[in-house]
Image (tube, rainbow, N blue to C red):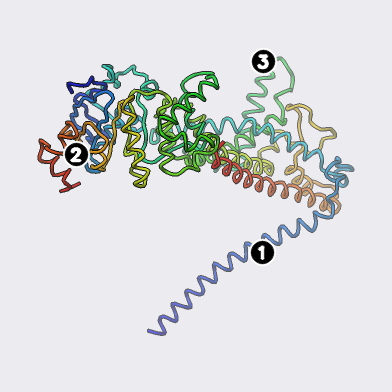
Amino acid sequence: MTRLSQRFKRLENIKIGLTGVAVLLILAIMVVLLGTIFIGGSKVITWEFLSQSPRQGMTAGGIFPAIFGMVFSMFIMLIAVVPVGVLAAVYLHEYAKWDHWFTRMVRTAVTNLAGVPSIVFGLFGLGFFIQFIGRGLDHSLGREMLFGQPCILWASLTLALLNLPLVIVATEEALRAVPQAERAGALALGATKWQTVRHVVLPQALPGILTGTVLTIARGAGEVAPIMFTGAAYYLPYLPKAPTDQFMTLGYHIFVMSTQSPDVETTIPIAMGATMVLLCLTVALNMVAVVIRFRTRRALHKGR
Amino acid sequence: MNDQSTRLSIEKFSLYYGRTKALEDITMEIPERQVTAIIGPSGCGKSTLLRSINRMNDLIDEVRVEGSIKLDGEDIYQRDIDVVALRRKVGMVFQRPNPFPKSIYENVAFGVRMGENHVMKSRIEEVVERSLKEAAIWDEVKDRLHRSAMELSGGQQQRICIARALAVEPEVVLMDEPASALDPLATAKIEELIFRLKEKYTIVIVTHNMQQAARVSDRTAFIMLGRLVEYDRTSKIFTSPANKLTEEYITGRFG
């Protein structure tokens, strides 16, 4: 009896110990990863690093064009993904019948879209946006190689596609959090369905939608695979001026510096610095998301 | 129903949720400017009946109705009826206070803003003041109209919801156990309010509280298992009910 319970106890301790080891492992990876990047990166980050172009085959100089291109592409991506994603979620959650076959099909499509590897999005962007839509536009406008080539527009739209499920899911979640009683209240006052959505549901869902949007940027900024065929450039001596220009962006820049550099020794610190900038940006965006959620929620509670 | 003109008439009305029959063959006439109470045990269909009058049951999938409900002689279940317009004529107050997380002012102005384009500010102010006065809460909130309605107590919130419903000038006001989530003092205020509102509005109230039905209503309908058991003057129902079931229910033998 006592020997048996002792054995149980030992087994129990081993199991608890295993969970502890797993946690420690994760912590260790975090510390090593962030530590390496921080130690390597903090040395090179200066104002010049952030505000100048790369020089001498990217073995010197800064990363400004990559930051600029990233902001540019995120801007276009948001213009595309937020309206489509939010409206799709509003349709799915507020209008569509819950168990209708069409709704279920769309929902399944959204879930599956979220699971598609990002390189597939890249290839899709190349085939659909550039070859099909871009070439088609060029052909019908009588232009030569304006839309039918990799550029910010197509890269951003590919990123938008990649992030569409995220926006839809975040928005649906936010809509679900709005009490049903308030929808009923508005409808009972003779508001139309759209008025109810517009004036009662969406204002309350806004914090959740904004949070989702900011997280979309954080994710979009770091993606490389979807943009390497659709618009990101290895190196450009000028900043992009129009959506039809190619662009440099941070994630791809890091990839290029760490794999294609002619002089690895001198590029590594720059790549570290760029990685640190990207990481800080992602962390900052996540924090912005938290702050937005907190503040709008409080404002909503006070009423306006 | 001889001394009062009829505003609402429910004729052979049945309602199904999918295959389940929730209401069966209900016929009753609801007189103008009186309070009609609907009582009955939990799950008997009294709220369903109430929600049929402004078609809030439409929000539930797979609801099917038979028979008709006529408001001023017009069947509200006709194919081409404007449900939005109907709900402006038939207001509703819910069981739990459900103000919007907006200011008191915006809560009351909501219906007016949704119903008309470009409403004059002065008109909205006028409507807000009139409605809050009608709902007997003006004195309590007049100094903080632009504060959130969520800061108010439950009883005050419920009166804001009543004011909000009155603001669109409905003909009929439906109340679904409006005091069941409130304390006795707040309940007394709501009851007093109902009593005064019948001068202007036709009121239908669902309640599980029989004393409340006896206090505020002119007519009482007793519903059980989706059927209308008895419908008569409140004084008659509570003193000499015709049906044995009614008597057993009001004397508390079941329910």
The chain to which mark 2 is attached is B
Q: Is residue A6 left or right of residue B174?
A: right
Counting from the top left corner in percent of width and height, residue B233 is at 18, 31
- Residue found farthest to the front: B139
The residue that disc 2 covers is: B225
Counting from the top left corner in percent of width and height, residue B1 is at 18, 23
Identify the amino acid type marked 1.
Ala
> Within 10 angstroms of label 3, few (less than 14), some, or many (20 or more) residues?
few
Mark-to-mark CA distance, 2 and 1:
65 Å
Of B37 and A191, nearer the camera is B37
Please state which of the two labelled residues, at mark 2 or mark 1, is closer to the viewer: 2
Residue at (52% x, 25% y) in the render: B125
Mark-to-mark CA distance, 3 and 1:
57 Å
**Residue A28 circle label:** 1
The chain to which mark 3 is attached is A
**Residue A140 circle label:** 3
Q: Is residue B187 left or right of residue A45?
A: left
Up-down relation of residue A245 to residue A264 (above or below): above
